[in-house]
Image (cartoon, grey):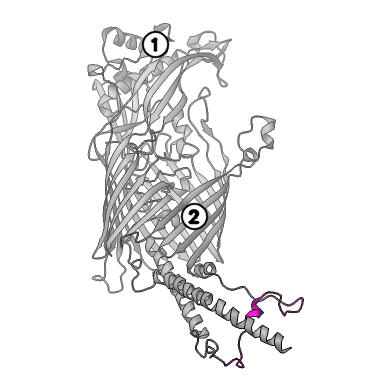
Amino acid sequence: MKAARTLRLHLVVALLLLAGPAAAQDEEDKDMVEGSGSSVQPGSEDDSDSRAKPSGEQEGAAGESDAERRAAVESAAEESAAGEVAEGEAGGAPGSAAGGSAPAKAGDLDEPFEDPLAKIKGLGEPEGAAEPEAEVSPFDFELKHLVLKWSGKIETNARFRVEEKSVGDYYTPGTHELPVGVDRNENIFKLKLDAIYGRFAGIADIDFVWLGFPGEIESIGELSMRNRVDPFYLEPHGLYLEGCDLGLEGLDLRVGYQKVLWGAGDQFNPTNNLNADDVEDVLLFGEQMANLMAKLDYNPWRSLTLSGVLVPVFKPALLPRSAPLGLAGTDRMPMIEQQAWLRHKLHVENGLSGLAGYPTVVGSVHPELPETSLENMQYAFRLAGSIAGHDLSVSYYRGFSDLPQPTRNHTQQVDQPLLDPAGGACEADADCPLGACIDGQCGIAGVLSTDVTLIFPKMHVLGFNAAGEIPLTWIHPRANGIGYRFELGVYFPERVELTMDQGDLVLAGVPVPAGEYDYGLRGGARPTVLDDEPFAKWVLGLDYSFNEYVYLNIMWVHGLVDEFGAGDILSEGYSVRKGGVVDADRAELMNAVIMDFLLGTKEAGPRYSYEILRPRLADYAVVITDFKFDDQRGLLRLFFMLDMSGYFEDRWDEAQGRRVRKWMGPLTDGGFSAIIYPELNYNFGGGFELGAGGLIQLGKSYTKFGDAANGGSLVWTRARYSF
């Protein structure tokens, strides 16, 4: 018995000698881990992440500014540090009275001690005994410094078109009509995660969208394909990594799918050119798509930031589903104003070919994206700061317009008779409007089908932004200040020319050989659709809060996202909204065209054509009013936008012997175009919200908001749960 006890004692001493150095080393390693983990926390006195970023920069995808995210990191770090201090105070330091027993002295073996053999699993334990709790590993300890922020929403949208929109005629190929009915039945599941660890963060912001409409079903086999019967897609708003103070205090890097929105304006931002416009949803005007880019910020002082952004791959704008209607019309000639006579000539020739039974249609449209190369990478720089409470910035962008311009038209004759569903009986071609009598019924003999090639022109943009508040305390001590925002973009586009060619044609019995069109321009030049003359877009906005329930925002917007090129109050330039031939005898029109061809004159086009014009860059007045009620749970918003530029009717005047232009002002029947957008939302609490409204687009078919390509007027409902 004594021998066994002596053996046990020797074994204990041996284990203590072996375990002592290892335990001490483990404790030292743990102290090093804890020390290194806390030394880099932004909440410490050495934290350089606590500096504020200049306001006015909207980094859309994450939903928070850099300063807000830094504040969240600091708060989480302080809570973690406070928890560690509390644990240390409760547990005490090693060797203290609170932290455990004092070290045993030599020969003092009768004092209580912790038996090392008890740590050996299963030794001296009865069967079925509970296992001790696992020790906290260094990995679990470091997780205390990781901040995770989850959020999201579930949303359903239903929209109904209340007016029919159409372009073209029965022979127009593709989509050219939008009927009354359900326009959208969309369901969205959004997930957003911010993961922050010290000076580093990762952001994921993704929408899962179910369209609610079956896709095109062309065969019964496609009924077994879920992506056709129940189509959906993913829409990333942000998916990027970022780090702060990378080798230099104030130097931050963000890489990945992101939005860099530098514009100070509200929804209208001529300096937001790094991200492509997302105009697919007309109710979300002003949205932009995330793209892969690298963004570097340097913040040497609290009120100054230098930024540089590199976008390796170009992304075009996302167009609305009604956009094909804008391509169905062939009368909106794109040539610049200095070549207006060429537009007039083409109007007459297209009209004549239609009268001969071969109307002109758009057969196909082929956008050509810029080549993915080092030369075509987009980049931008910005200097932003704050002076006396006013946010100011200047920027430069080099890249491409995300909306294309035509660069080539190829026309070929397609002989394919087609009866007019509404056509009457006939005996000869002269009895039919389009000059084709087919088996006793009016129709067409075929079409002149034009294939259009589009390119995205290069451009440079200089930007300036200013935002702040004008105090009104000099009027009344309790008066709120007036907020202001000014955003200016000066564009320097590249010149774009149009090449027009055709195959062999036979029009009204006259053969036209294949080849490039004879433009009749000096020196054999091709027509210009975009001049390289600089132009400017801007927005000036003022907002005022009367109290916590009433808010007013007014803006002057010069140039929308789809308006491009010089032509406004600063320089002459117009876009064609409608064109064609005047009512004239077919024989008279044909004789005029033949005489121009034989004599080399330019009389038929100006005399027999007409156009409806507007400035390339128009001006708009925008008024937004918010009325909150029921303790701010309810919101009634009224949005009104008026096209202020008006329109010009351009045609030949026999009395004056020349073409004249008649201006139709913004409040006249021919020049009026506006949007009225009422919206009602109510927040029931707990993240649940219901909304309804209407988008009413007013104006004739050639006006900005009466255009069929905008999709027409809608009413909508929305339910949303946010978490």
Image quadrant assignment for residue 114: bottom right
**What's the CA distance linking mark 2 and mark 1?**
55 Å
In this picture, which residue range is highlighted in magenta?
108-129
Please provide percent x and percent y for residue 60.
42, 54
From this viewpoint, which residue is outermost toward the front? Answer: 3
Q: Residue at x 54, y 42 (%)?
A: 161
Please provide percent x and percent y for residue 502.
40, 15
Residue 433 in view: no
Q: Is residue 86 left or right of residue 11?
A: left
Assign a secondary structure to mark 2. Answer: strand
Residue 127 colored magenta?
Answer: yes
Q: Nearer the viewer, residue 105 or 10?
A: 10
- Residue type beneath disc 2: Ala
Residue 660 in view: yes
Q: In which quadrant of the rendered image does the N terminus lie?
A: bottom right
Residue that numbered label 1 is attached to: 514
Majority SS type along the magenta span: loop
The answer to whether residue 72 is above or below residue 582 is below
- Residue type beneath disc 1: Ala
Marking on residue 204: 2
Q: In which quadrant of the rendered image does the C terminus lie?
A: bottom right
Assign a secondary structure to mark 1. Answer: loop
Marking on residue 618: none
Q: Nearer the viewer, residue 487 or 49?
A: 49
Q: Residue at x 65, y 40 (%)?
A: 226
